[in-house]
Image (cartoon, helix red, strand yellow):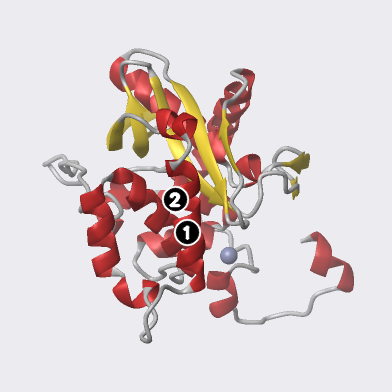
Amino acid sequence: MSLMKKQKIQLDKENYYSIEADKQYMSVSQFKLFNECEAKALAKLKGDYSPPSSNALLVGSYVHAAFESDEEFSTFIEENNGSIFKSRGGKYSDFETADRMIEALKVDPFALFAMEGEKECIYTAHLWGADWKIKVDSVNHSRMTFSDLKTTQELQKRYWNDKYNGWVSFIEAWDYVLQMAVYRRVLQENIGQTYTPYIVAVTKETPPNKAVVHFDESRFDFEYEYLEMKMERILQVKNGETEPVRCNKCDYCRGTKKLTDTVEVGALIYE
Ligand SMILES: [Zn+2]
């Protein structure tokens, strides 16, 4: 045991996504990763695993940057030039789609209204037994609202979901309700007021579909109970008090799998 209490790092734009920040803080994406696969989440914290870079992720960041500021957008384009532009000129089709998505929102006064506010706001708070960090796309203090921009395949697509035990939209499927619930709670701790969340969604279809999504308040209570239920185990694993369970199907588990036994047919689909 050290006599000096370890100083928490001051989070900023540069270190927000660092391993050190993830070790010291819980975040919505870390929580989701632990739920998906404990072994993978822990390996990521130890620096033994980094998620494969995906083009979809890059396209999402591109659309985000466009609404952050002109400066941020040009920096992003400069830094990712090779992924955005073909050597023979013109953009790769994913980024042409992204440009159409950006345009679809930019010509819509209601969408722009929903995104008005301070951009990329970082907050922390102690909740559910851990220090949390959040980075909110846009916070509007005068309206007491915040919003998050999401890109998706199509608005109406249905997904089977075990957590909700039913068919859900992309918002629940990607745990965006949980994300909004956490942001709302962390903001409450920091500001002492309850802010209303919105998701500004835009699709990859041609032409893009779009919506500003609001949430029935009762949805958040379910998420808070869910967080309460899951956090004890996650913190035990994160603190090294319990061995992580391998999901045995994610990219990390497949890549590090060593067979020791046979499986019965039925176990293939019910494990
Ligand atoms: Zn796994």
> Residue at 30% of width from left, 17% of height from top?
191
Quadrant where the C terminus is found in the figure:
bottom right
Q: Which of 59/103 is in front? A: 103
Asked whether mark 2 and ligand 1 are closer than 8 Å, the reply comes as no
Rendered residue at 36%/24% (across/down): 187
**In this rendering, does residue 241 appear at all?**
no
Task: In the rendered view, tell whether residue 136 sits above or below residue 238.
Answer: above
Question: Can you give x and y, in whole percent of width and height, for residue 244 in the image?
Answer: 52, 58
Q: Is disc 2 placed on a helix, strand or loop?
A: helix
Mark 1 → mark 2, Cα distance in angstroms: 6 Å
Give the vertical position of 98 relative to 260 (above or below): above
Left or right? Give the position of 244 relative to 63: right
Specify the quarter for ligand 1: bottom right
Task: Say which element carries label 1.
Answer: helix
Task: Name the residue rendered at 60%, 54% in the picture.
Answer: 207
How far across and how far down the image is residue 110, in percent?
A: 48, 29
Name the residue beneath numbered marker 1: 98
In this rendering, would 202 be left or right of 249? left
Check disc 2 and report the residue beneath it. Answer: 102
Q: Amino acid at mark 2?
A: Ile
Q: Is residue 212 visible?
A: yes
- Residue furthest to the front in view is 107
Mark 2 packing: few (<14 Cα in 10 Å), some, or many (20+)?
some
Q: Would you say the beta carbon of the disc 1 residue lies within 8 angstroms of ligand 1? A: no
Is 147 drawn above or below residue 39 in the view shown?
above
What kind of residue is marked 1?
Ala
Q: Residue at x 31, y 19 (%)?
A: 141
Residue 245 percent across, percent down from the top left: 58, 59
Q: Which residue is at the front of the view, 52 or 8?
A: 52
Callouts 1 and 2 close, C-beta under 8 Å: yes
